[in-house]
Amino acid sequence: MRFFQRRAGIVLLFLALVIAPAYALAQDNNTINVAGSGIAATAFRTLTDASGIGAALNYTINGTNEGINALCSGTTDIALATRPLNDAEAGQCAGSGVNFVEVLIGYDATAFITASGNTYLACLTTDNLNAIFAPSAAGQTTDWSLVNAEYPANPIAIVLPPATSFAYARLDSTTAGEGFRTDAQILADDNAVIAAVAANPDAVGVVNLSSLTNLEAEIKAVGFQNNTLNTCVTPSITTVEDRTYTLANRLFAYVNAAKLDAPGLRDLLIYVVGDTADELLTETGFLAPSEATYAQAREVVTTGTTGRVFSKDVNAFTVAPDLTGTVNIGGAAQFFSYISQLQQNLTQFYPNLTLTLKLDGVPAGARKLCNGEIEIMASYSDLTDEQKTNCTANSISTISFDVGKQAAVLVANGNSPYLSCLTTQQLPLIFGAQAEVTTTWQQIAATNPETPILLFTPSQGDDLADLVLIDAAGKILPVRDDTESDDTATYRAAAVANVEGALTYMTWAEYQEVLANNQERIQLVSIDGGAGCVAPSAATFKDGTYPLTRSVKLIVGQTALQNPVVQALLWLIYSDENFSLLENAGYVGLSFGDLPVIRDNLQTSFAAATAAAEAAAALTGPVVTDNTATEEPGATAETSVTDEPVATEEVPATDEATATEETVATEEVPATDETSATDEAAATEEATATDEATP
């Protein structure tokens, strides 16, 4: 790490010597003062120099922390940063009357590569980085089996870019020790690294992610483990922007809104996020944002939008750790499996927040919500007009939050081409209990062979059956009783692979497990709901074109949103740490990248409900509550739970599922730092560099 700081000091000293003379202009009202990160300044100046716009810029390279401090104290006009403002800094700006415009310039992202012929190196972890690259690894970690016992004992070859490169510096900031192992090969640039790695199937190389925008056929990117999601993520602009690929820093320009109309500045910023910016950034070693992000950035600059736009993942919401109370949840019985997972994941941390589940169907849930008996209802759609009328009669207004969609995907034997696409009309004939049982595929379609139908299904009561077994009249049929039942999706997929004409269904998450199991001789079935065959995918789930999906929503009484206990539970559901629970429960269509916007909307809704309650209290007298929510910098929501005796209540069966009432416990994950370790390292390194660069 210290090596990186010295290296950064040399680089930033050079930047200071180059930039300062070029902009040592007489200070007047038209001069635009720029301070902050030398890394971000490299990207920013590359773009501003190419613009040809004659704005008068005066640079001070003093690191992210000092640049932001200067912005918030009113002594600079633009702060360049390798991380978002944290909430303490945003509060400092607000306290000084400084409104900022947040402009995302690009990304500083690193990628690992190996040869296309490498059959074992698919993912690296933080521990792997130290084992492979740290100085102490020289002479110790000499072959790949010492990194992972499942890897072959082939000799390790390390290929690095020059020590002056951003990829080198960024990897150094995430690896223990000063610099890297002495037996690493250091080459002139990313192109040389790519060529060397392509020639050695046991080599691993480090490059800027921007160098992989057009991957050579001879190499491939290596994934990196996301510890929060417990999954390996392949580097790409998509995974960088949705925050799932963690070896990347965002590069920001924070602009004092009061200076935005200085001569040339707005035009300059529009150029920085304009049509030609991506090529210029890539040439400099940075990763350009997606076109959608660029368009959003241009809109921000054009309209002068202030506040967070590209860093909504940073927030100040917190709930008192000793919060005690109960949240009553009703509605769809299928929500039980998810909320049970949430409870199991959270109980150990927060013993004073109790969930009481009254999941006896959507109609009953809507009635209870409108009667004020529950705070949250799980549903497959918004309230009907009749249900809204009932709520209005009791002075209850509601707001809904998307959880995602339930989706059923069908997996068929790979040697059965007639099963490549099935219609929604055929599915009840295949899986449903009918007066006339279908036994061959020719009974489903005359063009099919007389191959016997062999079905593998989850056990009875599975949530997905409703999606597969809805007939033309909208009635949900029971599953036929001659299927082979097993709840393990990988087993069902293996069974399907062995017999022509075999078919099963599962969740999308289960299908990913099947793929990870390298199951052969299977095919994913497309579904025709009347508009042609549509293959299941994240994209078709999200846009609603895949037929076998249904939305899952949480409908909340707006007055309940001022209750800290309800706030805490909703915050938990949409936290980064619990996102994997949604996927594990089979919900799709909601991406990890959607969470910051949802949480921002939650905070807005919480604030509005609290303000409305306070206004009502001012007219009618205060409403006494034992729970208090606060907002403090640098924390995420905390809640608590207790283990209560489990109680079940039998109710008449609905067409959704068997109703369930149960009291369970929930919790929240520990608060996490808003700034990643890498961001902090970058800020520290830049500050150190400034000390060295400043006389």
Image (cartoon, rainbow, N blue to C red):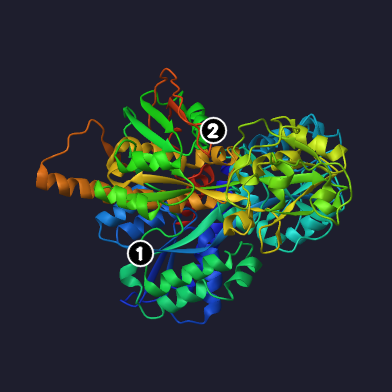
Identify the residue shown where x is 40% and y is 39%.
Answer: 365
- The answer to whether residue 634 is visible is no
Identify the residue shown where x is 70% and y is 41%.
Answer: 434
Q: Is residue 148 rendered to the left or right of residue 11?
A: right
Q: Are marks 2 and 1 in contact (CB under 8 Å)?
A: no
Q: Which mark is residue 117?
A: none
Q: CA distance from mark 2 to mark 1?
A: 41 Å
What's the amino acid at mark 2?
Answer: Ser
SS label for mark 1: loop
Outermost front residue: 435
Expressed as whole percent of the image width and height from the top left, the position of residue 491 reads 77, 32
> Label 1: how many residues lie within 10 Å, few (<14), some (14-19) or many (20+)?
some
SS label for mark 2: helix
Question: Where 521 sits versus 139, above or below?
Answer: below
Expressed as whole percent of the image width and height from the top left, the position of residue 564 reads 30, 37
Q: Point out the image quarter for the C terminus.
A: bottom left
Expressed as whole percent of the image width and height from the top left, the position of residue 426 reads 72, 51
What's the amino acid at mark 1?
Answer: Thr
Outermost top residue: 645
Q: Is residue 644 rendered to the left or right of residue 622?
A: right
Of 519 and 333, which appears nearest the observer? 333
Which residue carries the number 2 mark?
337
Of 224 and 185, which appears nearest the observer? 224
Which residue carries the number 1 mark?
306
Q: Is residue 18 rendered to the left or right of residue 526?
A: left
> Label 2: how many residues lie within 10 Å, few (<14), some (14-19) or many (20+)?
few
